[in-house]
Image (tube, rainbow, N blue to C red):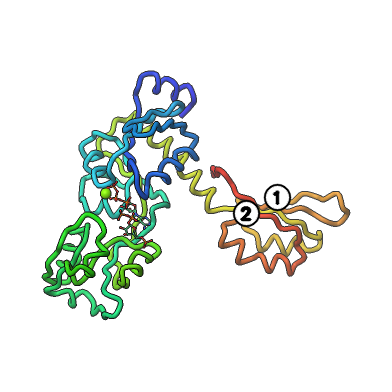
């Protein structure tokens, strides 16, 4: 989308309405991603709505549980929300893009001293959770009947106060379970934040969305890759080149010192660690690793 098209859409107020979490685990990462996409949003304290100055997008700040409903109804065109909420709410929305933050899992947990004997051991148990639909789906899959106690927060306290025998809640580091004398027993869903879309958005809004996704993908690709520079003696170049994937091929430039070259290459973090010792063995030195801000392939 050209800058002229962007300006006229903003002027006509033909904007994509994006719902994000007002406050909580996903708020800061959602705002950060938009900023990294070059979208300039002034978020006044306690404002429930905000417009971008340089991109045809408007933000609604909402409770995360409400976002799938708003997107299904078309009150918002798109939303950033956890997959856990999308699957729990079962609304008719399209999951358009994974966003790479808000990574967690929905797991059963039991008291530290207890053994978890699999799905069938839940028969007749009281299970506290904020995800009754996903827990019921799991129980149905194994033909198990249990008593689901729906609570909206502080689920980990339930076994300690005699409200439930087992819980099913979100886990990331596991420290909340640990602090409440519980241990993770079985993972039923892996989750991260996703971009969801209303199924009937107009072609103009679809074009704005594609432009947004293009930016999100450029930011995410860049995060997974590093720009690596190193110096190496020329006789080692053929062997070093074999180790390096690069975007097309590595860039090799002569150094001012006779017989030496500077090598520039884009590598994923994993690739870097896999080959760095071999690079050193082949004579590479002065290896620098730099972050990449955006990457368009
Ligand atoms: N420990 C965690 N680590 C990473 N992501 C998490 C974690 N806990 C939750 N999330 C993700 O962040 C989302 C929002 O979590 P949060 O705890 O802020 O929700 P909430 O209390 O329901 O907020 P709201 O007030 O908007 O209803 C979750 O639905 C999940 O996708
Ligand atoms: O495994 P951990 O890293 O400890 O994270 C898990 C906790 O994070 C979430 O709650 P959050 O802290 O967002 O607070 P909330 O219960 O108020 O939503 C979730 O509901 C767990 O309680
Ligand atoms: Mg919520």
Quarter of the image containing the N terminus?
top left
Q: Position of residue 34 (x, y in %)?
A: 44, 39
30 relative to 133 in the view: left or right: right
Q: Which mark is residue 246?
A: 2
Inter-mark Cα distance, 1 to 2: 8 Å
Q: Position of residue 158 (x, y in %)?
A: 21, 65
The residue located at (22%, 57%) in the rendering is 130
User: Which of 216 and 254 lies nearest the eye of the viewer?
Assistant: 216
Q: Quadrant of residue 49?
A: top left
Quarter of the image containing the C terminus?
top right
Name the residue at the front extreme.
161
Q: Which mark is residue 251?
A: 1
The residue located at (46%, 42%) in the rendering is 32
The answer to whether residue 175 is above or below residue 84 is: below
Badge 1 vs badge 2, beta-carbon distance below 8 Å: yes
Q: Secondary structure at mark 1?
A: strand
């Amino acid at each position: 989308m050209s800058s002229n098209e962007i300006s006229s859409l903003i002027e006509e107020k033909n904007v994509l309405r994006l719902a994000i979490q007002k406050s909580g685990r996903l708020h800061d990462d959602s705002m950060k991603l938009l900023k990294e996409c070059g979208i300039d949003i002034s978020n006044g304290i306690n404002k429930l709505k905000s417009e971008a100055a340089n991109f045809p997008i408007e933000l609604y700040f909402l409770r995360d549980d409400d976002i799938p409903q708003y997107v299904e109804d078309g009150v918002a065109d798109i939303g950033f929300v956890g997959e856990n909420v999308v699957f729990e709410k079962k609304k008719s929305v399209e999951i358009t893009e994974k966003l790479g933050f808000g990574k967690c899992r929905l797991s059963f947990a039991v008291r530290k001293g207890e053994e978890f004997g699999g799905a069938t051991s839940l028969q007749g148990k009281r299970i506290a959770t904020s995800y009754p639909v996903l827990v019921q789906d799991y129980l149905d899959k194994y033909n198990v009947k249990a008593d689901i106690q729906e609570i909206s927060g502080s689920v980990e306290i339930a076994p300690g106060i005699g409200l439930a025998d087992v819980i099913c809640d979100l886990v990331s580091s596991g420290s909340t379970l640990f602090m409440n004398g519980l241990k993770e027993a079985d993972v039923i869903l892996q989750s991260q934040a996703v971009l969801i879309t209303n199924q009937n958005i107009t072609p103009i809004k679809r074009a704005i969305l594609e432009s947004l996704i293009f930016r999100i993908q450029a930011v995410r690709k860049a995060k997974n890759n590093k720009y690596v520079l190193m110096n190496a003696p020329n006789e080692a170049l053929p062997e070093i080149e074999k180790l390096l994937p690069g975007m097309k091929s590595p860039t090799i430039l002569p150094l001012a010192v006779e017989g030496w070259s500077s090598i520039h290459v884009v590598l994923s973090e994993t690739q870097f660690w896999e080959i760095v010792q071999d690079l050193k063995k082949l004579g590479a030195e002065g290896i620098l690793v730099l972050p990449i801000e955006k990457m368009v392939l």
